């Protein structure tokens, strides 16, 4: 069947939307001809794909399905854990609507292939979770002259924008030389949704139009079809970040592996020790080490010394105490450990306390992987 | 998951012990998922925009400095960057992107609403 007409089964299937004013048969035929590239088949991509399955949809995702995805990434299921997300989504969408052509792309979308992979689409939906890909999508859309719908979500909030013609998605790391701009037919807007109880549920705000400073669409634009030469990593502040994070902290605090923490907890000899878990209370409530004390990072860094002091209450001599920091992955714990170091340097320059600050690399995730496989990973 | 903007602390409704001689304006502040706050700022400020004075009307630059001094007890770097805010924090003045309103130079009016929102990147 050609793209210029509907089959009888399609009239029946799409009737409920075709009767909407402003939609009609022409609207349905436009959908039939449309080719939409959905980048990412995750939390945003899944619901978008479900509703888009009336058009020809290309799904780009190089990730695989994990069980922790299933509660929100509703096209995937338990049986397909380990599949490529793009292929899992394709199967679900074909079951939903056999009239659409679904193309699953399982290779990562990169500066070197974005232009050639996206050239045949009429709309790009950015449903990704990495800043570098977001800027790549923006640049590719500018070069190809395709409208870009950029969506993002975290926790209880979501944001989306439509960029057409000239644009550079300024989200999420706008810097002055990179600008967001839209000239479709109306003023650019950013839409914000929040389900958090005390915040404004919905906002739609006016944003700046095209900027002459924009490196993608301004008069002195430097971005060309050769996207491979655009320094996305450096621009997003990712270049030079070491894969292994053991060297972080600048030597200000000792960083130890979970095995060393386990040995310290078992041996229980020598100086007094305290283990501080800096995760949020909700996370701590999911699983925790019995020897640990929960002081969320935000609370801890407000007064590091007092927090440690109160945990050491009852000890005769706190000099030389071992202070261990633990969190989910080893980021917040390091921030907390460094905050304690800094506070001690200011309050106790003589270092009479001589506390031994030790941050646990990799957090409770590493604990589960390397020490106790029965400790839940969430 | 805590966003940069949520690092801001709760504000008490009004600064206490300020010199009553300085004429004040009242604006609404909102950040993260916290309820709105009514805060008072001096109506006019010094030339370098660092303190109350009589040189010019109060600006967003003064507001941001005031927030860093009064609302942030730690991790100022999560919010501020120079005189402005960190990349990735969106500032809205009366529901409009502050870039359309003059950014730091915008002169605050009585009852203005200033909102700080972290832009998101999750998918």
Image (spheres, rainbow, N blue to C red):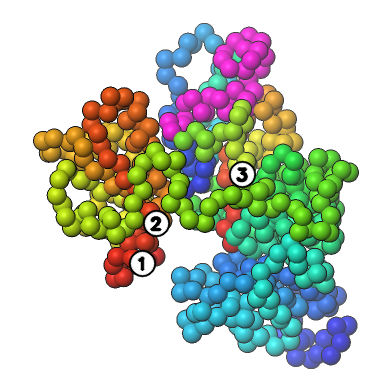
Q: Residue at x 66, y 85 (%)?
A: A94
Answer few, some or many: residues within 10 Å of disc 2's Cα (few below 14, many 20 plus, some between 14 and 19). Answer: many
User: Where in the figure is residue A333, as x and y percent of width and height?
Assistant: 37, 47
Q: Residue at x 38, y 32 (%)?
A: A342
Same chain under badges 1 and 2? The reply is: yes
Residue A51 visible in the picture: no
* Residue B65: in magenta span: yes
Give whichever of A273, B118 is nearer the camera.
Answer: A273
Circle 2: element type: loop
Q: CA distance from mark 3 to mark 2?
A: 26 Å
Q: Chain of mark 3?
A: B
User: Where in the figure is residue A117, as x and y percent of width and height?
Assistant: 77, 71
Q: Chain of mark 1?
A: A
User: Where in the figure is residue A9, as x and y percent of width and height?
Assistant: 75, 91
Query: Which residue position is annotated with label 1?
Result: A369
Kindly identify which numbered label has been placed on residue B88: 3
Residue A262 visible in the picture: yes
Q: Are marks 1 and 2 in contact (CB under 8 Å)?
A: yes
Kindly identify which numbered label has been placed on residue B64: none
User: Where in the figure is residue A197, as x and y percent of width and height?
Assistant: 47, 51
Query: Which residue position is annotated with label 2?
Result: A362
Above or below, comparing residue A24 to residue A272 in the picture: below
Quick check: B16 left or right of A172?
A: left
Q: Are marks 1 and 3 in contact (CB under 8 Å)?
A: no
Q: Quadrant of the N terminus of chain A?
A: bottom right
Answer few, some or many: residues within 10 Å of disc 3's Cα (few below 14, many 20 plus, some between 14 and 19). Answer: many
Circle 1: element type: helix
Boundaries of the magenta span: B46-74
């Amino acid at each position: 069947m050609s793209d210029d007409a509907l089959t009888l089964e399609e009239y029946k299937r799409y009737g409920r939307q075709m009767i909407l004013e402003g939609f009609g048969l022409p609207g349905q035929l436009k959908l039939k001809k449309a080719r939409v590239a959905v980048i990412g088949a995750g939390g945003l991509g899944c619901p978008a794909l479900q509703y888009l399955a009336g058009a020809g949809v290309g799904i780009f995702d190089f990730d695989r399905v994990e069980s922790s995805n299933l509660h929100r990434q509703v096209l995937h299921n338990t049986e397909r854990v380990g599949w490529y997300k793009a292929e899992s989504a394709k199967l679900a969408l074909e079951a939903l609507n056999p009239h659409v052509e679904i193309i699953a792309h399982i290779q990562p979308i990169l500066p070197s292939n974005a232009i050639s992979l996206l050239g045949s689409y009429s709309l790009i939906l950015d449903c990704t979770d990495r800043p570098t890909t977001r800027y790549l999508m923006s640049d590719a859309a500018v070069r190809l002259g395709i409208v870009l719908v950029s969506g993002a979500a975290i926790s209880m909030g979501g944001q989306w924008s439509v960029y057409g013609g000239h644009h550079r998605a300024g989200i999420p790391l706008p810097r002055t030389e990179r600008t967001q701009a839209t000239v479709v037919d109306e003023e650019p807007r950013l839409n914000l949704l929040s389900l958090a109880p005390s915040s404004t549920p919905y906002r739609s705000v006016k944003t700046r139009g095209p900027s002459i400073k924009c490196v993608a669409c301004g008069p002195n634009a430097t971005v060309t079809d050769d996207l491979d030469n655009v320094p996305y990593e450096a621009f997003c502040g990712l270049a030079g970040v070491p894969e292994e994070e053991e060297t972080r902290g600048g030597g200000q605090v000792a960083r130890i592996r979970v095995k060393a923490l386990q040995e310290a907890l078992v041996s229980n000899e020598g100086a007094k020790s305290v283990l501080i878990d800096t995760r949020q209370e909700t996370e701590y409530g999911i699983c925790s080490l019995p020897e640990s004390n929960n002081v969320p990072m935000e609370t801890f860094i407000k007064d590091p010394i007092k927090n440690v002091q109160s945990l050491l209450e009852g000890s005769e001599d706190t000099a030389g105490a071992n202070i261990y920091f633990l969190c989910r992955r080893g980021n917040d714990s390091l921030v907390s450990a460094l905050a304690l170091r800094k506070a001690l340097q200011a309050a106790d320059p003589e270092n009479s306390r001589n506390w031994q600050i030790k941050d646990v690399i990799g957090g409770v995730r590493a604990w589960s992987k390397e020490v106790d496989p029965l400790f839940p990973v969430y | 998951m805590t966003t940069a903007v949520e690092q801001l602390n709760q504000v008490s409704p009004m600064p206490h012990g300020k010199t009553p001689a300085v004429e004040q304006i009242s604006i609404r502040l909102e950040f993260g998922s916290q309820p709105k706050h009514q805060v008072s700022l001096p109506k006019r400020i010094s030339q370098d925009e660092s303190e109350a004075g009589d040189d010019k009307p109060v600006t967003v630059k003064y507001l941001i400095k005031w927030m860093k001094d009064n609302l942030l007890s730690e991790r100022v770097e999560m919010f501020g960057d120079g005189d402005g805010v960190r990349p990735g924090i969106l500032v809205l003045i009366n529901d409009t992107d502050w870039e359309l309103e003059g950014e730091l130079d915008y002169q605050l009016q009585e009852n203005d609403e200033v909102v700080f929102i972290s832009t998101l990147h999750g998918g």
